[in-house]
Every structure is written in C-alpha cells, then in structure tokens.
Amino acid sequence: MCADRWAFVSAAVGLLALSGSGCGGGAPSPDWPVYGGSEDHTHYTTLSQISPANVKQLAVAWTYETRDEFDGSEMQANPVIVAGVLYATTPKLQVFALDAATGKELWRFDPNAGRPPTSRIRHRGVVVTGDRVIFNYRNRLYALDRASGVPIPTFGDSGWVDLRAGLGRPVEGLSVSASTPGVVFEDLFIIGSSVPEALPSAPGDIRAYDVRTGALRWSFHTIPHPGEFGYDTWPADAWQIAGGANAWSGVTVDTKRAMVFAATGSASYDFYGANRLGDNLFANTVLALDARTGARIWHFQGLHHDLWDRDFPAAPALVTVARDGKPVDAVAQITKTGHVYLFERTKGTPLFPIEDRATPGGGLDGEQPSTRQPFPVLPPPFARQQLTESGLTDRTPEAHAAALKTFREYETPDPFSPPNLKGTIIFPGVDGGGEWGGPAFDPKTGVLYVNSNEMAWLLKLVPRSDKSLYEATCASCHGARREGNALGPSLLGVAARRSRAEVVQVIREGTGRMPAFGGAMDGGAVNDLVNYLLTGRDSSVRAVGTSPYALPYRTAYFDIFLDHEGYPGIKPPWGTLNAIDLNAGTIRWSIPFGEYPKLAEQGITNTGTDNYGGAIVTENGLLIIAATTYDDKIRAFDKATGELLWEAKLPAAGNATPSTYMVGGVQYLVIACGGGKNGAKSGGTYVAFALPESARR
C-alpha cells in the first residue's frame, strides 16, 4: 500500500469508535462498513453514481484471485469496505485486506498456517471495528490488527477466543463455529453460532464478548437452564445434552434501543425428536434481547418442535413501515416456508394477523409432533405451499414419469406431515423459500425484496442399525456406501486425501456442521471407525450403545427432489425474485430468477434456479443481485417492476451478497464468486465493477 493510503487508513482508525465503522448523518456513506451494509441488515444504499440510466455500462474494474478454491469449496463472503480498504475471506477462510480501488492485496492472514482444510468451510465475512478485524475460523474467534492482519495478543488467548468454552459442557466434545459475522454494540461483540444438526451437538447460546479483551460478558441460553423461561418446553435434562437452537444466520442490533435481534434454527437432531419432547423454546424463534445484558425482552416461536429443518434462515431485518399514516419501527423475518413475519420492534406485537392452524400429529414411535403451528395471514407466501401431482415437472414425458414415481413413493398429504420410514417430501425445501442471504428493504417505499428457492426435498428415515459404527454415526450425512449426499461430502478415497491423524482429529473435534464425537466414543471405537473409513472394511466395530445421542432412527436419504436427468422434479419456477409491500401486505411483483444454461440452449428459459446470497436495493431505483447457482451471472433489475436492466457473466456463481462503495469519486460493485453449491463448480475470485469515466455523474 502506498504511504498516503496508509496514513489515510491510520487516521480513519483513530477516528472510528468501537461501536461501529460507519458514518453518521449528512452525505451518503462511501463505505459498506458491516455485513449486509448497515446495522439494520436491509442491504440498502443511497449511493447513486450507478443508476438505472447507466447500469448497462458497468464493466469489470478489477479482479482479485484468492488462489484458494478447492473442489466443493463455497466462498460466500459479503465484503466489508471501510476508508478505502476491502476486507473479506477466501474459500479456505484466510482473511485479507485489499486496496478497494485497485484490488491490490495489502495483507493476508492464514489461521490454518498453510495446512489444507479437513472439510468444506462456509463463511460470510468479517467485522471491522476500531483498530481490529474480528472473524472466526472454526472454533477460534480471532481479533486481527486492522493495519497488518496480525492477531492482537491481548484478545483472548494470544489473539483468539475458543467458542467451545463457556457452554457448560466439556470443550473437547463440542463442535462450534460461526458461519455469519457478529455485530458490535458499544464495547461488546455479539455473535450466534453454527453447531451440528446431528447429535451430539452443542447448544446454540447467543453470546457477547468484550471487544477489547475477548472476555465473555453475557450469554443467552437458547436451550433454557432450570429456572429460566422456557425450561418447561423441553425434557428436564435437555439443557445438559440437547443441541442446536442456534442463530447461525447472524444477529442484528438496534443501537438506539440497545436491543439485539436473533432468529434461531431447529434443535438437533433435525428429523426425530422423541428425546426433546415439547415445543423446544427457543428453537425456531425470533428473539429480542437487551444488548447490554442478554436478557429476553420478547420472543416469537414460528415453529413448535421442528421436525423438518425449517430454521429461520436469515437474521431479522429492522424496517420502518406505515400504519395508519404513521411510521412504525418493526422487525421483518423471512422463513424457509416462504412467509414474512412482521413485528413491532419494542414489544413484538404482530403487525399482520397470525393464525394458529391444525397440523398433523402421529409420527414414529416415541415422537409427539405439535398439532398446531402459527401462520402469518399477510403478506401472502412468496413460495408455493403444497406439492401435488399437478405440480410435477412436465419438461419431458420421461421427466414427468420419473418425478411421478418418486412422488408416489414419498407421498406426503400435508406439508407438515412428520418424517417416517416410507419417506416424506419437504416443500418448500430445507433450503427455502428464503435463505441466509436475507431480504433487502427500501425504506422509501416499504418494499421488501426476497429471492426464493422453489425446490422440494426428499427425506427418508430408517431404524438405526447397530452392525456398524459407521452406519450408526456417519451414514446419515455421508451415505450408506460413503458416497456422500446433500449433508456431507463423499468419503470414498479419503485415505488418499487425509492422513490417519487428520481423520481422527475431525472425528474427535468435529468440523462445520459435523458434530464432535470425542465425548461419545472411546479410543477403541474411534480406532474402529477410522479403520473402516480408510479401508472400507467393517471390522470389529462398536455401536454407541447407551449413549443419549444414539436415537433409534437415522436419516437414510436426504436430498433435492430431482428427475432422472438431474433437474428439479417439479414445475418451474425453481427460483424466484419477489417484491413485497410491507405497508399493504401484498406482493407487488414476482419473477423467475436464474436459468440452467443447458436448458436455455434448448429454448427452455426463465425456469429459475436455486439461489444463495442476497440483493442490494438502491435509493435511485436498482435491485442488484447475483446468487443464482448455475448460470454464473450478476444482474440489475428495475426495483419497481422487476425488469432486467443489466447482467454480466462471473467466473463462478456469486452465491453471496454484493457490496457497493465509493473510493476516489468512483462507485464500485463487488461480488464474491465462490460457487460450489449443489454440484456447481467452485471458484475463488472477487470481481469489482464500475462505470467508465464517461458515464459517471
């Protein structure tokens, strides 16, 4: 970096308070200072150099090759830009800083010291506050010096804090990370977590750390302890052994009111809950907490006793809507089922009616599904709610026949039919409806923009076999023959990719969504399991036995409902982009979003595809989004009508939310091109766009 830029950054660091990195009132901020653009997570910008009139002239300004992608990697970061410097992460979760005007690398930090990752890593960005950059690598929460990228030794244990600590359980038996950045409030760093969706799993406590020292300041127990509100919605010992109920998609802070908002996921194990009978507060819940103490202010549980992995998929968005001609500060929450909940912000009062409707009971032995669930009356759902034979693909007669065969095998009379041994269709699927990219909101019009997945998923459970430890603990995520599935990668040939010691480490410590089995297996069991993984031979293995984590059923099949050629087994659209009026509770427009290139070559267009990542909405009329999995494009739409105004090809799918900022009088648009979703190619490039000088205003 040139000396004058270092001086500029140094001065900016000195001026920035610990409570945030953005600018106050007056002129539009040139920065994208936090994940999602602002503390309210609305993805909104008033920058206006790029406009509907000139957006077609956008061209690549610079690219940054991370040189870090690997097969199956998914780079999902939303870059943070402060004072002319861009901060983000690579596919292997190295952190870097770039000159935001040129893409020139300033520094890079590798938390894994050059070692290859033991599994796929999902990560969505960093937090920049004062003189530091805060991020996590697996269970390590780091604070780096903002100018150099070197760990700050006074933060935690020589630069990092162990996210496994402070949960009331043995550290060596836990897998805890955070795929989404936290938030800063005053001198606190507040963060949710990612934990395994199978057992054993850590609890999803929401925690606040001292931003300077890393000391734990408060913790909210999403699985309540004895005497805490909600304890009676779980079995008596759940606080000691249950897991999940975690705010994996991030948290949102209202600094004015000193409130933090979170939306949590399901309890583990996702699909069978006889060991967690009850409503399971605070799983699948929108939470409002006191940002200074972590005390509960209000909550709303959107799904009682979840058996379908229907997490709240995105952090709450803080919006202002009109009611009776007056502005009302509110919280908007999207769901995987394609609904939007809207609550008054301070007390949690619903701003549209919510109905309590009957849902099926029954289920497997020992299960007790809730027979009532809440549904918002308005706005209308932005995804289809029920799959019938008439909704199956008719792309070709052969595709329809294949889909019909599967549909009848997995016949599901109600979207909330509990999982069973015959199989069920989850629709909308476990990847939405809405997903982790979250919505964009325009405060001028009251319109919320949401990209939606329209994919059905298939789920089948089977009795847990005790003839092999692999079947009991690994097959649900890695396939009965180690071939992999939607939950986990293939383990075929793992001996050529990983040493025995590395495999043992992953089994004991866990990684990403994989649980740690160190507390559930003795040394002999781990040894037997590693032998099977490395050789494929089932020697004298041992079942988990009387472990509280060994449930009588496991997942036999869990994946997207596809036809015989690998395309979705339902009629298009398979992905949509939607504009929802939160003032009126109506859908203004909805369009197919994305294409399959091979189908487009055959004249089958506007099908939509699955999509991951969010949009930017601009004050001057644009909705900008990448997200689509297979066509590798970034697009700009007219936010009022959904008309396509511009598109550009990316080196890999931009399954992330873009950022926009200004440096040197130029507005840039940058996107992480990481790909890797659902069989798409992986990438490791950041691409920045800008207008030619002649088009700038």
Image: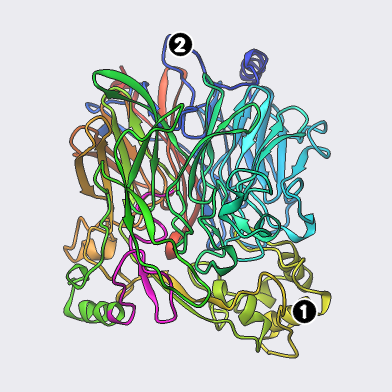
Q: Nearer the viewer, residue 93 or 192?
A: 192
- The region drawn magenta spans 408-435
- Quarter the N terminus occupies: top right
Q: Is residue 597 left or right of residue 501?
A: left
Q: Is residue 573 something that shows in the picture?
A: yes
Magenta stretch encompasses residue 420: yes
Mark 2 is on which residue type? Answer: Gly
Disc 1 residue type (three-letter): Ala
Name the dominant secondary structure of the magenta segment: loop
Which mark identifies residue 25? 2
On residue 552, the disc is none
Q: Is residue 424 left or right of residue 156?
A: left
The residue shown at (17%, 72%) is 394
- Cβ–Cβ under 8 Å for marks 1 and 2: no
Q: Which mark is residue 525?
A: 1
- Report x, y in % for residue 187: 68, 24
Mark 1 lies on a secondary structure that is helix
Q: Residue 122: give x, y in percent of width and height.
A: 56, 52
Residue at the (52%, 69%) spot, across then down: 272
The spot of residue 503 in percent (x, y) is 73, 70
Instruction: For the C terminus, give its image quadrant.
Output: top left
The reply to whether residue 616 is in sight is: no
Task: Report which quarter residue 197 is drawn in.
Answer: bottom right
At a point 63% along the width and 66% down the height, the residue shown is 199
Location of residue 35 with respect to 180 vertically, above or below: above
Circle 2: element type: loop
Label 1 or label 2, whichever comes before in sequence order: 2
Residue 650, percent from left and from top? 39, 48
| Alpha carbon distance from label 1 to label 2 | 61 Å
Q: Residue 634 magenta-drawn? A: no
